[in-house]
Amino acid sequence: MSVTLSDSTAANRARVQRSTRASLVGLVVSIIVVAALAYGPYAFLSKGNQQNLTTLFIYIILGTMWNLLAGYAGMVSIGQQAFIGIGAYGIVYAADILGLGLWIGLVLALVISGIVAYLVSFLAFRLSGGYFAIGTWVIAEVIYLITTQFDTLGAGAGISLTTFRGYKPEIRIAVVYWIALAAVVVAVAVTYLLLRSRLGAGFTAVRDDATAAATLGVNVTRSRRIAWVVAAMGCGLAGTLLAMTTLNVQPGSVFKIQWTAFMIFIVIIGGIGTIEGPIIGAIVFYALERYVGDVGFWYLVILGIIAIAMVLFLPKGLWGLISRGGRLQLFPTGLRLATPLATPLATTTSSPTSGTPPTTSAEDL
Amino acid sequence: MQWANAVVQGLLLGGLYALLAAGLSLMFGVMRLVNLAHGALAIVGAYLGYVLVQKTGLPPFATIIVVIPLMAAIGWLLQSTLLNTALNKQALAPILVTFGLAVILQNVMLQLFTADYRSIQVGDLAGASIQITPDIAIGVFPLMTFVVGVIVIAALQQYLARTKTGRAMRATSDDREAATLMGIDNKRIYALATAIALAIVGIAGVFIGIKTQFNAYSGDTYLIFAFEAVIIGGLGSLWGTLAGGMILGVATTVGAQLLPSSGTLLADLVFLAILVFLPTGLFPKVVNG
Amino acid sequence: MALLEVDSIDVFYGDFQAIYGMSLSVDEGETLAVIGANGAGKSTLLKTIAGLNSPRSGDVRFDGTSIATLPPHKRVPLGIALTPEGRRMFPSMTIEENLLVGAHKARPGPWNLESVYATFPLISDRRSRLANNASGGEQQAAAIGRALMCNPRLLLLDEVSLGLAPVVVQQIYASLPTITAQGTTVLVVEQDVMHALRVADRVQCLLEGRTVLEGTPSELTRDQIASAYFGI
């Protein structure tokens, strides 16, 4: 893909590209880290640490999914706990009640999350902005209340996941750990590839200015719906992992709105609108929860204050600081110019910046 | 006849929902801000009433006279510091900031008052009722709630329609930039709108405290009710919000008769049905500002 | 002494410069017409005087004091009123409510509901019509009336004729002498040169953000104006 400017000599040709040296390094480092983590249970990871990392992986998946919705598609949902619950109940239902076993159960739980998300999108998408946010919450409440009506699903008391019966605890913990690791890789990779696709450019356009994007031929609703369904499946995946770690699905616990609060904190702390942000955010959030969590409820108060301060004064989060305002990208989703052009305007990349308002164009004068 | 009774109780409950929803509707109308901390703020009002009764021995209803200016002051401060800043930032900032605020308020209240349920005691009044027919009795307190709800909605409506500041608020809602050209300071108008919104939700909070037991987390349910009443009634219509509250109230009380175990399910389903079939609500605003 | 002095201002929209070192002054009681093609910077100039844009350099003085950093709502009580391009009526309010909002920060003076209706008969029997349902001409008359309600010393009129039938434009311009007779200073921006020339004491022509011609209507020839307007 190259854009040729007036001058035809190769040296003056502006080449548009995605990868940078940093992104190549990022890819190599990611592969090494994932490989090391995959090997971990054989060598250096205790059972406890495998369980800790599984929790961290769940946070990374949740953050990545909420970021896909809010950071890229511009939709603030506070009802993602619906899909965590559906994923958790889905795997119990498919694996145990239907007797399909762990693997098919896992896949089926994701499919159910996706289908429910697709169907409720026709309700939720009638609202926008803040009302969309509360609308998703109402939908989550309804799904929660309906779930507890079924005695087969344990009604209000919850239900156990029995598919791991017969596994030795250390094997089960390692298997769940590997599934979680694979799930993180899949979640991040799917999000990354989605954003690099044509659809991804559409997302960014929609988030920055939905009306303008629509006039440019971006199918706004379709883009949003795809982001919504993918994010729901991701949250469903996190829900199956929760069921696998706790082995017991409590409606009040899997459907609690705190999950969405965690997602929001993770994304805001890490940096909204970047792939790296939620990963950093999840690590920081996990560390805070682990080491500061014992100050009890003040912990959430402090988190709330940090989140508000970051939204107002550090909107690109920690990753924005680390990457020096977006110049360093390990997972570049936008296009950038390989050879800088003469005018300063052209050096900006189409990389996502947090929802800036459309600037006044010359035609408005 | 228990159904007729449920309907009557539901209609009265609508007054409380309208009180909860009016502020949410006003803030959205004036500055397109959806305040996710609205439910938590209602509970702040309930705790204020509770503390006043406990510490000063004020009669429960008299606490409203203190709660209104306190909540209005909180609203004014909140808007002039936090929320006006958030409105100037990226598009998602107001939603995220009010969400963070809700989390903070909830947990501060939890810390101060524990998770134990409290309520504001009004003695005999809680059980007092007027027998209409052998099967239908109207509680004195629900009736008071309803009357206050109607009075507040009517007063707010008149304020917006007849007063100079009310007009300035509507002008700002229609076109903020053009309003500044009329000499209207939109930040002041926003602060005033939030002050009014919180004063009203403070009244709602005291009534919630008297009507039922509450704790720090109770606000979530009330935010949802407020939101549903606004959408059912149609954005930008205060009388619509009252009607929406009454429909929701009936759905709640009838739902509790039908499925005692599932609480608000019927109310939520009524809301979703209206969203599907009447997406602009029962009383859509004629003009889109 | 000049009521309004614009002193070599540069105005930008992001990286785009709309006005280059422009200066102008308007005396008390005078009517100045600023003309120019689309994109010449006329509306930007008025928005900068009203406070919706701020100049990156240069100064705007009103009655001798700098107002360059004042927000728009603080300029109204000083006596600056803008009828913006596109009229920008408050659509959910009636014509009369729109006028009343115009009086939000009213100074003492001759303008009130009665005198506005007398000056613009077009809207006097449309008082309770929603602005959204009013015709373009009614909206334009009401928009000028709304600006007058604060009893401005300086009235800024942006593209009064835009999108209106010639008859309606005639009617609205016919009211201008009534306004200036009250001693109000008027700065009118127009693409319609003939109307501008007819009402103005002085004309200033802009091209691509710069002043290219100024003078009284009687001094300037049609050819001078045409070449300044189109930059040929």
Image: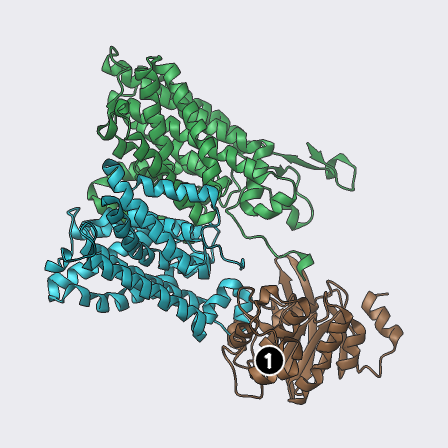
Chain colours: A green, B cyan, C brown
Horizontal side of A158 relative to C50 (left or right) equals: left
The residue at 65%/46% (across/down) is A346
Does the image show residue B56? Answer: yes
Figure quadrant of residue B155: bottom left
Question: In which quadrant will I find the C terminus of chain A?
Answer: bottom right
The residue lying furthest to the front in this view is: B134
Q: From what the image shows, is residue A52 above or below residue C132?
A: above
Question: In which quadrant will I find the N terminus of chain A?
Answer: top right
Q: How many marks?
A: 1
Horizontal side of C15 relative to A261 (left or right) equals: right
Query: How far across and down, in percent of the image, does residue B82 sit?
Result: 38, 59
Q: From what the image shows, is residue B188 above or below residue B125?
A: below
Q: For mark 1, name the chain.
A: C
Residue for badge 1: C148
Mark 1: secondary structure? helix
The answer to which of B201 and A328 lies nearer the viewer is B201
Query: How far across and down, in percent of the image, does residue B171 sit?
Result: 50, 67
Query: How far across and down, in percent of the image, does residue B266 sit?
Result: 32, 40
The answer to which of C217 and A83 lies nearer the viewer is A83
The residue at 56%/80% (across/down) is C149
Figure quadrant of residue A179: top left
Query: How far across and down, in percent of the image, does residue C5 sit?
Result: 64, 80
What kind of residue is marked 1?
Leu
Does the image show residue C53? Answer: no
Mark 1 crowd level (few <14, some 14–19, many ≥20, 10 Å Cα): many
Figure quadrant of residue B274: top left
Q: From what the image shows, is residue C147 above or below residue A109?
A: below
Q: From what the image shows, is residue A63 above or below residue A98?
A: below
The residue at 81%/75% (across/down) is C194
